[in-house]
Image (cartoon, helix red, strand yellow):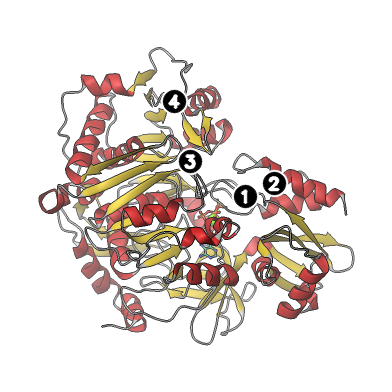
Amino acid sequence: MATYAAFHRRSLEDREGFWAEQAQLIHWHKPFNRVLDYSRPPFARWFVGGETNLCHNALDRHLAARGKQKALVWISTEVDKSRSFTYEELFFEVNRVAAMMKSLGVKQGERVIIYMPMIPEAVFAMLACARLGAIHSVVFGGFAAASLAARIDDARPALMLTADGGSRMGKHVLYKALVDESLKLARHPPRKVLIFRRGLDPAMASVRARDVDWAALEREVTLTDVPCAWLESNQPSYILYTSGTTGKPKGVQRDVGGYAVALAASMQHIFCGEPGETMFTTSDIGWVVGHSYIVYAPLIAGMTTILYEGVPIRPDAGIWWKIVQEHKVAVMFSAPTAVRVLKKQDPAYLKKYDLSSLKHLFLAGEPLDEPTHVWITESLGRPVIDHYWQTETGWPLLSAHPGVENTPLKMGSPSFPVYGYDVRLLHEITGNEVKDGEKGVVTIAPPLPPGCMSTVWGDDQRFVDTYFKDFKNQLIYSTFDWGIRDKDGYYFILGRTDDVINVAGHRLGTREIEEAVSAHPNIAECAVVGVADPIKGQMPLAFAVLKDASKRTTPQEVMETVDKQLGAIARPKAVHFVTLLPKTRSGKTLRRSIQALAEGRDPGDLTTIEDPGALEQIRQSLGNQ
Ligand code: ATP
Ligand code: MG
């Protein structure tokens, strides 16, 4: 067996040879004539001249060997329903939706916005776009009308797909009504809106000549075999807007061939997903994790994928583990925020189900603090792999590689650079590589590997200006995250470069202090922000959620914990206890909004906030200071 280190080294020293081999994992209608064209840095074109199709690789290719195997299992604890589709059935459904879209005039290269809840039809729609060579842009269902309108105007879609409604925590969310509202604001509305009715909005209004009923159109189409459009590897497959945690969302454009290869390879070397096994990714199709690891990668790998509409604690905190038992889930992918939610619940739920099918639990999306990593590893009795990536990269950038070598895991660390990524930790001012144990900005020396964003949709210059201009004299991709590498080569992510707190000239990552606060045994999760201080420049301020609110815990105790872990320099000015933290719908803490409130400023755009009540608590605890 190869070692991780040799594998990674080869991926950089013999880039083209390495990726030419990985490219054999997918089907090429026409072989590529060049592995990499890097004649226009930093734009990388992978598998030039090759023709392929994502839908073919996800479905058609498996029909002969696994037509009767389950491809998609939908479970909704919101409407108490489930449905499953074999590869043959999913193939049929996708072809039918492709025929429907074709009948509405959708052509190769045109954009289709999918604004749908977590239902099978949303997956059919994504794969149908891929089949036709139409470019999908899935917009997360939690976004408000103005955010949706901004994305419509940027993507200029020919068609939008939606449903009457979705459901969250048993509460109905009216998707179609929101689409109507956004289309009043949009300057580039689509020709048609195709609506799937679930019966969640009986009073749904219809706009004549624009709105089309899904079921009616489904009955009309006769053409159900739609051939795959063979696309040159570098044509766009989709646009996905970044979460917008740090500002204006960017339209991340992805290719076809490089993406398919990167996903297929990651299933082997990182996720260890075998054909016929089941993968359960708890994300949403509106996020990159949903694109890559609910829809495309598991299907490309011939696995069964689970699409779950619901939350981790309803009907009770055992629901995910029940799904793992019932569907013999082998590979699971979730987020630290969800694990911290479970940490506040009765741990007995984790022992109630047979989890022996589970090989690994992968977690990504935000820093996984060491205590949570330890807790979930011990509770599950399975390896829990922290891995780090971004919407921009499309697949992991730092991770352990159990499919290559079983390197020991370190709690709180996403392990090592993934093959294909030339990761450098650079000093923020000098731009030189930092030494082991020193903090630096996580960057990637281009070319970016296959599967990463090709450009910002419609704006090549913005791609270069946004990501490659941070270090003046070098063309280098910045992740805008701080990292540190220990003497064994393990990386630790310390937070975003704009989340740094400068206390009397010492630059501390919010993550470092959060980690120290979380070391207190009664703290489930916390957020630390820097607030202006007349003497020290900035001071950390902590907001913490207790595991057990009935156990007396004082701010003083928490401060002492931080003193012990990091030193008095990092000691928060105050520690406030709250019952929940303000987060985006993708589970990321809105530190910038907390900081704004603490400094008496406007908290900014809050359309992606999960629960406005959380910000109210922050406001109140600040008022009580
Ligand atoms: P925007 O770029 O629009 O502000 P965003 O950065 O929140 O939004 P994503 O691309 O979904 O949107 O998130 C990627 C970011 O999440 C990373 O840059 C990093 O800050 C954080 N992240 C992801 N995985 C990890 C991890 N394992 N450990 C620490 N941080 C992580
Ligand atoms: Mg980002």
How far apart marks 3 and 1 lie (CA) works out to: 15 Å
- Circle 4 residue: 164
- Circle 1 residue: 583
How far apart marks 4 and 3 lie (CA) works out to: 15 Å
Residue 89 occupies quadrant:
top left
Q: Name the kind of residue labelled 3 in the image.
A: Phe
Q: Residue at x 40, y 53 (%)?
A: 322
**Picture coordinates of residue 476, whole percent (x, y):** 49, 67
**Picture coordinates of residue 499, whole percent (x, y):** 67, 62
- Circle 3 residue: 140
Q: Name the kind of residue labelled 1 in the image.
A: Lys
How far apart marks 2 and 4 lie (CA) works out to: 28 Å
How far apart marks 3 and 2 lie (CA) works out to: 21 Å
Comes first in the chain, label 3 or label 1: 3
Comes first in the chain, label 1 or label 4: 4
- Circle 2 residue: 614
Q: Name the kind of residue labelled 4 in the image.
A: Asp
Which sits in the foreground, 169 or 541? 169
Which sits in the foreground, 501 or 234? 501
- Circle nearer the viewer, 3 or 1: 1
Asked if marks 1 and 2 touch (Cβ < 8 Å), the reply is yes
The quarter of the rendered structure image containing the N terminus is bottom left
